[in-house]
Amino acid sequence: MNNGDEVITPENPGFSVHLTNFDGPFDLLLQLISRHKMDITEVALSAVTDEFISFIRALEISGEGWRLDQATEFLVIAATLLDLKAAKLLPSGEIEDEEDLALLEARDLLFARLLQYRAFKEIAATFNQRIEAFDKTFARVVSLDPALAALLPEVLIGVGPARFAAIAERVLTPKSAPIVAIEHLHSALVSVSEESKVVVEALRKGRTLSFRSLIADASSTLVVVARFLALLDLYRQGALRFNQVVALGDLQISWTGAETGEIETTDEFDIPVVLEDETIEAKGIEE
């Protein structure tokens, strides 16, 4: 049979069938059906079964005998093809019989079983080729050549007990606490109490000022922060009042404290400055 498609030649023809629309090995017939190159409804399965029985009898007469696994394999494939053919011959209209509906639902499963058979057969043939190929190879079980073994350098440890002791001492010695250097900080410290005096003097003169005007002459961000902290401390003492007419607008600060006299300022925000001479003196006392 030649219809211009790819010719599929099985590795071991074995059983062959002779039909009106096909003449060749049974494996080739299965491959054509699985690849949709031949309609299962056009295959006379009864004729295929009769030819297989004749094939088995011919083996018995010739004295070669037949294998049980070969006959079982054919029966499974023939039953699958029969179920598949029955499912395809059912009418495509409305189906009321549940048994017919089950056959239609199992159509894909039957076809998948046929493809699975072909896949296992091809894999088995591949394994057989590999086994036959590797049966002719043998592993070389010998020791390393003495000439090559002599090329490996000896393992030499060039560290003596004294060196090991020095390494252990360096590893086990506690490390000193890290010192944070402040030499890179060039900004001078700002005193909140000193900036509080500046704020009080400005409010006593202007009575009501905005926060923006209070920090207009600030030389750095630290001065702005210090004056803001001073305002909070004065508000806590009741010396001033805050007012903001518009949300997110300028903050107006009004002085309500005494017109004269000293105002108590806090130093809780200030960082105590330790002079270098005092540090050296303190170290001497500890020693």
Image (cartoon, helix red, strand yellow):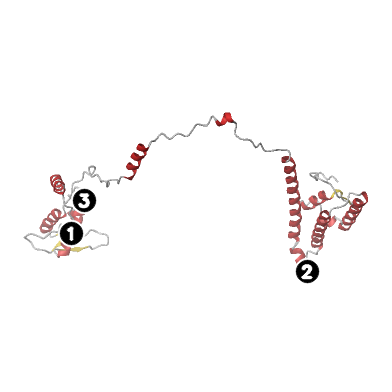
The amino acid type of the residue labelled 3 equals Leu
| N-terminal label among 2 and 3 | 2
Q: Secondary structure at mark 1?
A: helix
Query: In which quarter of the view is residue 142 placed?
Result: top right
* In the image: residue 139, left or right of residue 214: right
Q: What residue is shown at x 7% (from left), y 59% (from top)?
A: 262
Q: What residue is shown at x 81% (from left), y 48% (from top)?
A: 28
- Residue annotated with mark 3: 222
How packed is label 1: few (under 14 Cα within 10 Å), some, or many (20 or more)? many
Of residues 252 and 195, the one drawn nearer to the viewer in this rendering: 195
* In the image: residue 228, left or right of residue 106: left
Residue 99 - label: 2
Q: Position of residue 207 (x, y in %)?
A: 12, 60
| Whole-number angstrom distance, CA of label 2 to CA of label 3 | 91 Å
| Whole-number angstrom distance, CA of label 3 to CA of label 1 | 14 Å
Q: Position of residue 98 (x, y in %)?
A: 76, 70
* In the image: residue 234, left or right of residue 109: left
Q: Is residue 44 above or below residue 175?
A: below
Q: So how many labels did they put on this image?
A: 3
Residue 231 - label: 1
Q: Secondary structure at mark 3?
A: helix
| N-terminal label among 2 and 1 | 2
* Residue, far left: 261
Q: Secondary structure at mark 2?
A: helix
Residue 131 - label: none
Q: Is residue 213 visible?
A: no
